[in-house]
Image (tube, grey):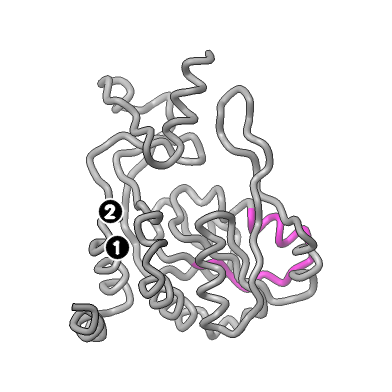
Amino acid sequence: MLLRMEFEMAELSPAEETRAILSSCHAILENDHFVYCSGDHGSGWIDKDAVFPHTQHLERLGDLLAEAVRHLRPEVVCGPATGGLTVAQWTAHGLNAFCCFAERGKADAKTGLPGKFGLHRSYDRLVSGRRVLVVDDVVDTGQSIQQTLAAVAEAGANIVGAAAFVNRGNVFAEGLGVEHFVYLLEERIPCWPAAECKLCRDGVRVNTQYAHGQEFVDAQLRA
């Protein structure tokens, strides 16, 4: 079965192959109520955690992304933990480059939303003066990758661009403040501010299994 799938994948474009991998892992979720790390709400989610256990898929996605960004000649690949860390590792492996990751600060006590990303573990010294590519698994509103870009820039890196397995179509290179934003698949999922959420207005329960729904519900209970 695996050999047959690999043969069929060889005939697909990178975008088609990426979507096929996500679909095979049941990672594309639709028609529900999700809360994203930005605080925005939406009806769809890419469950990258469903892909992460399958190392053969991660290796393939990493190789596809590495090939797509090779012309940028990155020396270091950095991603926001946790999902972006995995992308950084596999993409860096495909590029024979260094790998590091950014970590979140403490969550906001009032909103329950996670803190900003920063570089720790002496990774600021690793990226300083080097050509750095910042990556993530799925770019929703761009907040996680923007914060990682800011942390890398503050450390004195030469940022060559940003990249992702999937871009949800809400942000592009200009919005991220980079010249190059490379992604394998664009999967458009609209979102809106929590105060304007029609799903909340219609009484649709927030999904607490995925994204940041549980933090949102907990914060509402404390309010």
Q: Amino acid at mark 2?
A: Ile
Q: In the rendered view of the protein, which quadrant contains the N terminus?
A: bottom left
Q: Quadrant of residue 25?
A: bottom left
The first of marks 1 and 2 along the sequence is 1
Q: Left of 223 or right of it: where is 194? A: left
Residue 144, relative to residue 114: is it above or below? below
| Residue 22, disc | 1
Residue 176 horizontal/vertical position (percent): 56, 57
Question: Dot 2 corresponds to which residue?
Answer: 28
Q: Left of 159 or right of it: where is 199? A: left
Residue 104, relative to residue 163: is it above or below? above
Q: Left of 83 or right of it: where is 54? A: left
Tally of numbered discs: 2
> Does residue 154 show up magenta in the picture?
yes
Q: Amino acid at mark 1?
A: Leu
Label 2 crowd bin: few (<14), some (14–19), many (20+), radius 10 Å: some
Residue drawn at x 52%, y 64% as measured from the top left: 86
Q: Please state the extent of the stretch shown in magenta in the rendering.
A: 148-163
Determine whether label 1 and label 2 are within 8 Å by CB: yes
Residue 168 horizontal/vertical position (percent): 38, 54
> Does residue 136 show up magenta in the picture?
no
Residue 28 horizontal/vertical position (percent): 28, 53
Residue 46 horizontal/vertical position (percent): 35, 52
- SS state under label 1: helix
